[in-house]
């Protein structure tokens, strides 16, 4: 199992960003997937989940601003981040528990 | 939402010590709890699943126990490579929630 995140970077407050997670080594379409984040020096914070049938669940802190989606043909998981705030600054990990990617940094700052 | 409280926040112990980390849930989580180890600059790694099941490849010095609201991760003989932050995580109900972590140091 390999999970590789991309799409992070520096973005201004209120702007948008789209993260991708490329999956390999397993049948992507058969598994639910998660996004988890970790602010600098802080603990782990679950963000969102998408089931194999594309049902979604979100943490209250991101509900209405973030959208999780998947493209099974491309073996890719996405996280659309809108209306970004400084408190969204974190490393974002995709995971198919117990497997995690190495994470991608998102910095929200003017 | 279920709150997960880990204690202590920081634990300093000597090589060879038996070490116990605690995780307390705000309500019964029916043993639906995993333990993760995160070393500096790395992604978390699963140690224990469903309270007391050792993940493949994890040394047998790690063990988990608990029920209801109270759970424990034990390292029977602390090794230098065990320096890390340890997180419990519940998936019983509601939003998935992690504890705030216990940072384990070597004296």
Image: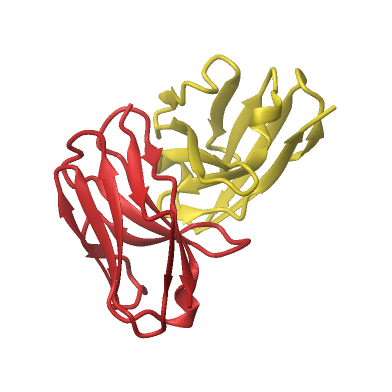
User: Is B103 situated left or right of A109 in this image?
Assistant: left
Query: For the view shown, which residue lies furthest in the right direction?
Result: A110
Image coordinates of residue A2 in percent, x first then y, are 55, 58
- Residue visible at 68% across and 35% down? A89
Query: For the view shown, which residue lies furthest in the top direction?
Result: A64
User: Is A84 situated left or right of B64 in this image?
Assistant: right
Question: What is the number of callouts on the image?
Answer: 0
Image coordinates of residue B31 in percent, x first then y, are 18, 47
State the quadrant of the N terminus of chain B: top left
| Nearer-the-camera pick, A33 or A39 | A39
Image coordinates of residue A5 in percent, x first then y, are 65, 47
Image coordinates of residue A30 in percent, x first then y, are 39, 42
- Note whether B102 is above or below A105 in the view shown: below
Which chain identifier belongs to the yellow chain? Answer: A
Query: In this rendering, does residue B105 appear at all?
Result: yes
User: Is A9 situated left or right of B5 in this image?
Assistant: right
- Residue visible at 38% across and 37% down? B97
| Nearer-the-camera pick, B106 or A13 | B106
- Residue visible at 64% across and 26% down? A80
| Nearer-the-camera pick, A45 or B19 | B19
Q: What colouring does the structure picture have?
A: by chain
Colour of chain B, in one word, is red
- Note whether A55 is above or below B36 in the view shown: above
Q: Quadrant of residue A81?
A: top right
- Note whether B102 is above or below A37 in the view shown: below
Q: Quadrant of residue B99?
A: top left
Query: In this rendering, does residue A6 appear at all?
Result: no
- Residue visible at 17% across and 37% down? B28
């Amino acid at each position: 199992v390999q999970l590789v995140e991309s799409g992070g970077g520096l973005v201004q407050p209120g702007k948008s960003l789209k993260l991708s997670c490329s999956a390999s080594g397993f049948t992507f379409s058969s598994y639910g997937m998660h996004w988890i984040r970790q602010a600098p020096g802080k603990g782990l914070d679950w963000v969102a989940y998408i089931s194999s049938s594309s049902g979604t669940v979100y943490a209250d802190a991101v509900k209405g601003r973030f959208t999780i989606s998947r493209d099974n043909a491309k073996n890719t998981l996405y996280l659309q981040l809108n209306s970004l705030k400084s408190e969204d600054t974190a490393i974002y990990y995709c995971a198919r528990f117990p497997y995690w990617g190495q994470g991608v940094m998102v910095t929200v700052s003017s | 939402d279920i709150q997960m409280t880990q204690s202590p926040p920081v634990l300093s112990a000597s090589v060879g010590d038996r070490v116990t980390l605690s995780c307390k849930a705000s309500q019964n989580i029916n043993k639906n709890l995993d333990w993760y180890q995160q070393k500096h600059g790395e992604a978390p790694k699963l140690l224990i699943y469903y309270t007391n099941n050792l993940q493949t490849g994890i040394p047998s010095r790690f063990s988990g126990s608990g029920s209801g609201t109270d759970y424990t991760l034990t390292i029977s003989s602390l090794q230098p490579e065990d320096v890390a932050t340890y997180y419990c995580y519940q998936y019983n109900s509601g939003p998935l929630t992690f504890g705030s972590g216990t940072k384990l140091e070597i004296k």
